[in-house]
Image: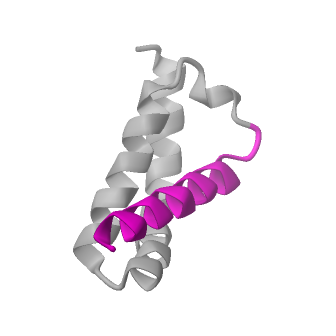
Amino acid sequence: MSDKKREFISRIFQENYRDLCKYLASKLRCRHKAADVAQEVYSRIFSLENPEEIRHPRAFIYKMASNLAVDSIRRQK
């Protein structure tokens, strides 16, 4: 993994993780599920070839997190 990719992922993780978990907890009504979904978001970003090219990383991770939260809610039903 390139240093640029590692630094990018580390930066967006540090800047957004806490607020992202709060956002997800409000949608999922469970802190533990929220943390799991947030981890999945970062795992998926990590798997991207060039995540540092994302123009609006905060919007990107929140949209992905929202989609994953909806998927999680649907699986529960």
Q: Please name the colour scheme applied to the rendered image.
A: one colour
Q: Could you tell me what secondary structure mostly forms the magenta stretch?
A: helix
Q: Where in the figure is residue 71, as x and y percent of width and height?
A: 44, 59
Q: Taking 58 as reference, is 35 above or below it?
A: below
Question: Residue at 23% across / 72% down in the picture?
Answer: 32
Q: Quadrant of the N terminus?
A: top left
Q: Where in the figure is residue 41, as x and y percent of width and height?
A: 44, 48
Q: With 48 as the anchor, is 35 left or right in this view? A: left
Q: With 33 as the anchor, is 51 left or right in this view? A: right
Give the farthest residue toward the front: 77
37 or 72, nearer to the observer:
72
Q: With 14 as the anchor, is 12 left or right in this view? A: right
Give the farthest residue toward the top: 2
Q: Quadrant of residue 58?
A: bottom right
Residue 67 inside the magenta-drawn segment = yes
Question: Residue at 44% across / 73% down in the picture?
Answer: 24
Q: With 46 as the anchor, is 53 left or right in this view? A: right
- Range drawn in magenta: 55-77
Q: Where in the figure is residue 59, as x and y percent of width and height?
A: 69, 56
Residue 28 inside the magenta-drawn segment = no
70 or 51, nearer to the observer:
70
Q: Where in the figure is residue 33, as x and y percent of width and height?
A: 28, 69
Give the farthest residue toward the right: 55
Question: Residue at 65% across / 49% down in the picture?
Answer: 60
Q: Quadrant of the C terminus?
A: bottom left
Tally of numbered tags: 0
Q: Taking 32 as reference, is 62 above or below it?
A: above
